[in-house]
Amino acid sequence: MNEKKPVSNVCYQIAAKNGRVLEVADFNTASGAAVQLWDNVKEDSQIWLLVEVAEGLYKLENKLTGKVLDVINAGSPNGAWLHQWDYINQLWTLEPAADGRWKVRSKLSGRVLDIVGMSQENGARLQIWDDVDGENQAWKFTEVKAAKKPAAKKAAAKRAAAEKDGPAKAEKTPAKRGRKPAVKKAEEAKAGAPAK
């Protein structure tokens, strides 16, 4: 197998063979929101934190909502759909599948994560089903690295330098460049505007 096993406390996108990824539908933060497949648009609703809570047992926590991948009504029969819910004890195992992909198996039912109707479309719902080694039951875990924000670092460095130099120097900076703070400009514009 080419792919190494996903590791705990790392964020992943979980993709079907066609490249569409698991996401919480419509950026919905409520318990019970649907989990579906969608084109990868690199949103937090499509990123899942894999957390090992006991040896070989994982929860999958959505980065946007903080809720976990769950089977509706703690279901165990074939066809039970998935959604997100507050973490109680929704546990999954990871098992090797073909082509460096992984099966995601429910600890409760022993069934695996599966695409309803083997759909390839955006909005396809997810369910649990008996393991039949189907392509719609094999998932690629791609690590999502935290994006660097150099602009935020520069702004923090500027604030730290301004605080070090004291408030008097920080207040003089906009005037020194011949610019007025935006609030001052807005007040002046409002004062000079004709009454309505």
Image: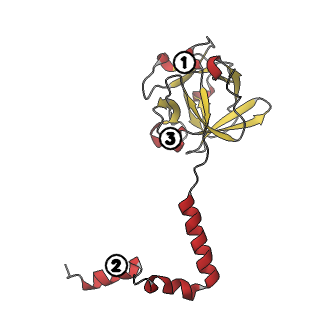
Among the two numbered marks 2 and 1 on one chain, the one whose residue lies closer to the N terminus:
1
How far is the residue under mark 1 from the one under mark 3? 21 Å
Furthest-top residue in this view: 132
Residue at figure coordinates x 55%, y 40% from the top left = 31
Residue at figure coordinates x 53%, y 44% from the top left = 44
Q: Which residue is mark 1?
A: 136
Q: Which residue is mark 3?
A: 42
Looking at the image, residue 23 sits to the left or right of residue 48; the answer is left
Q: Amino acid at mark 3?
A: Lys
Residue 140, percent across and down?
A: 60, 27
- Check disc 1: other Cα within 10 Å, few if <14, some if 14-19, many if 20+: many
Depth-wise, is mark 1 or mark 3 nearer the camera? 3
Location of residue 160 with respect to 54 vertically, above or below: below
Q: Does residue 107 appear in this view?
A: no
- Check disc 3: other Cα within 10 Å, few if <14, some if 14-19, many if 20+: few
Q: Which residue is mark 2?
A: 186
Among the two numbered marks 1 and 3 on one chain, the one whose residue lies closer to the N terminus:
3
Q: Of helix, strand and loop, which one carries label 1? A: helix
Depth-wise, is mark 3 or mark 2 nearer the camera? 3
- Check disc 2: other Cα within 10 Å, few if <14, some if 14-19, many if 20+: few
